[in-house]
Amino acid sequence: MRFIDEFRDRALAAKLAAAIADEAAPGREYRLMEFCGGHTHAIFRYGVQDLMPESVRFIHGPGCPVCVLPTARIDQAIAMAEQHGVILCTYADLMRVPASDRRSLLKAKAVGADIRMVYSTLDALSIARANPERQVIFFAIGFETTTPPTAVAMKQAEAEGLENFSVFCNHVLTPPALRAILDSAEPDAVCIDGILGPSHVSTVIGAKPYGFVPADYYKPLVIAGFEPLDVMQSTLMLIRQINAGRCEVENQYTRAVTEFGNRKAQALMKTSFERRDTFEWRGLGLLPDSALRIADAYAYLDAEVRFPVAPGESREVKGCECPAVLRGILEPTDCKLFGAVCTPDNPMGSCMVSSEGACAAYWSYGRFRRSA
Amino acid sequence: MQDKDRRFPLRLDIRQGAVDMSHGSGGRAMTQLIAELFQHHLDNELLRQGNDQALFTPPPGRLVMSTDGHVISPLFFPGGDIGCLSVHGTVNDVAMAGARPLYLSAGFILEEGFPLADLARIVESMARAAVEAGVTVVTGDTKVVERGKADGVFITTTGVGVVPEDIDISGDLAEPGDIIMVNGTLGDHGVAVMSKRENLGFETEIRSDTASLNDLVADMVDAVPDIHCLRDPTRGGLATTLNELARQSGVGMRIRETDIPVREEVSAACELLGLDPLYVANEGKLIAICPAGQAHDLLQVMRANPKGRDAAIIGEVVEDPHQFVQMETSFGGQRVVDWLAGEQLPRIC
């Protein structure tokens, strides 16, 4: 495949691996957090860890939108579908995320809720057009990457006068999550030497918003693409910064990311959404200014306004260490549930659901290392 | 057909008509549907007898039997339809024991309102597939359910076949040192169906690989009677089937990503949909595991058959108490190739 295979080239990988082994200083450890689930997936899918010297350790960050969504929001979506009889449209990887009481969207669908899997916001709009007598809610999740498409759908619904379409907005912002990780003052907080910065998110927001990472926390950050060679090259760039005592924002993913990002998408987000005062992240807790809600001008498209549900008591599974895994404090294998009762077939926590989740990636691709 | 024409003065309106509840009632309408549509296309001596069962004397040897329900959406997809698929699926399941498939039964569940023209297309396609595979559909059943209670048509086929003497092929016979091979490119069927389902327009149309493999298996078994395992990697794809075989045989497997044949357009589609071709369904593919000494011969025989033209050796069986299927990635690393968990779901970003 053109434009894909070039970034998975084995010979180039071997060269980069040799350069990393050569430049990684003996006797020290490089603890690098890959922020995004896309990076985690690439590291495991291609066996990137095998090409690294012992001293380079990847710590899996919270950048998996499915993994950081708290149980309460899934519970709320199920309640909307069940109590209001709407058609709830969702991206596929949310379907199996555990909700309270061992439920999930998939299980709610099985017992009668009208929940449909869509590939894009446009599919949700089509469903709304095809079912004028039904209310259709789009379950919007994701970081800045998936936010502009939601805004486009809202504009489109407005232009068409689609009165039966609304959005359950769960969009979250990357920089506040990064800050929360770096602020973590717990005694067992993970020590991070450098960060592989978001890839697709940065195509939208640009490189500039990460300036606080070196300025306030003295950590280097390299914006890294999702292909395995991107991850390796970014790793080398981080090692060079660390060795030289530099800390800067560098951009490895120059083929897609610019300093200021996609201004059109940013403008669209600005008119469609407003920041929530606070929002709960699984694993990181309540973070101020970290999520978006639908702007007042579009309140009629806001499913939370139109389809209120009584707040239930959301319960996480006891013993699930997803929160600590998402903060990089524990490895998936440190969790008692991992592999015992929690597997991709029967996920107890969200990190075991999405293939971008650290636990699922460990289980599916990397567990032979443990038993080797 | 003359007798039947006399029994039903008004012919079944196959062009404009639709299935209704009376077609499953056991009465005259059902008899007419069977005669003018099913028997007409699937015609053979045993079916013509019109009994509720088929009576035959099996040839000498051990019998194998397999059953498979088919519930695909869309019913018609590039490269095939539910009709030929329902023949191929069961013929292949029977053939994977090294058997020669002989007879099929077919059970239809039809949804009220289903166009008779579509049903006729499906049954014609079944008939063609049966002729190609050298099997006959000797007994069948038709039920109709109310509109909304099925998805057009569901077909369950059961197959019977006979295994030649001295052939012993089973999922629990893989041994460390054995060689693992496939007969061609992986993921074609699943991607063909998915691209149709999701309305994805690709420049090159990807066609399902749906096909009967009994002739290929016959060639293989003739040349190398000592094949240890054969299995068709349908749902769950290559990855899941290798895991099944590893568990049954109590062994591990090591495969090499660079040796696994995948069409360029299939990997591109998988890239776009966030899927892994190793987990995508196939309907005209088989995995063969044989002793290392005979791998070369077997590969040559497979490649000589059009259905094995792209056959390749993809790895070997190893000792491993954990029964892991491991893969050397094209990138040079290692990873576990796990069972498919739930459904393969596209990733969000």
Image (spheres, rainbow, N blue to C red):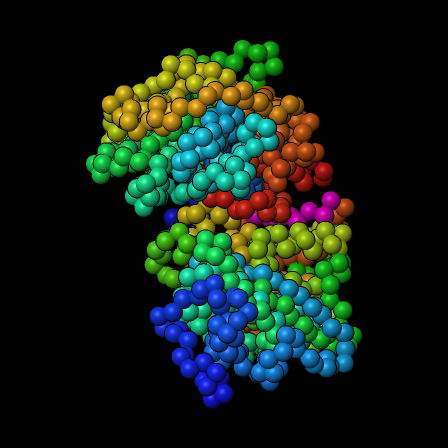
x and y, in percent, of residue A371 in the image: 72, 38
Left or right of B19, for residue A297: left
x and y, in percent, of residue A34 in the image: 50, 29
- Quarter of the rendering containing residue B311: bottom right
Left or right of A104, for residue A338: right
Residue B325 forms part of the magenta stretch = yes
Q: Residue at x 45, y 69 (%)?
A: B119
Image height check: is B317 above or below A173? below
Give the camera-side residue of A98 and A202: A98
Give the camera-side residue of A180 and A286: A286
Image height check: is A300 above or below B149? above
Give the camera-side residue of A1 and B110: B110
Give the camera-side residue of A234 and B180: B180
x and y, in percent, of residue A357 in the image: 54, 33
- Most extreme residue toward the bottom is B2
Image height check: is A257 above or below B301? above
Q: Residue at x 40, y 66 (%)?
A: B18
x and y, in percent, of residue B338 in the image: 62, 46
Start-end of magenta stretch: B322-329
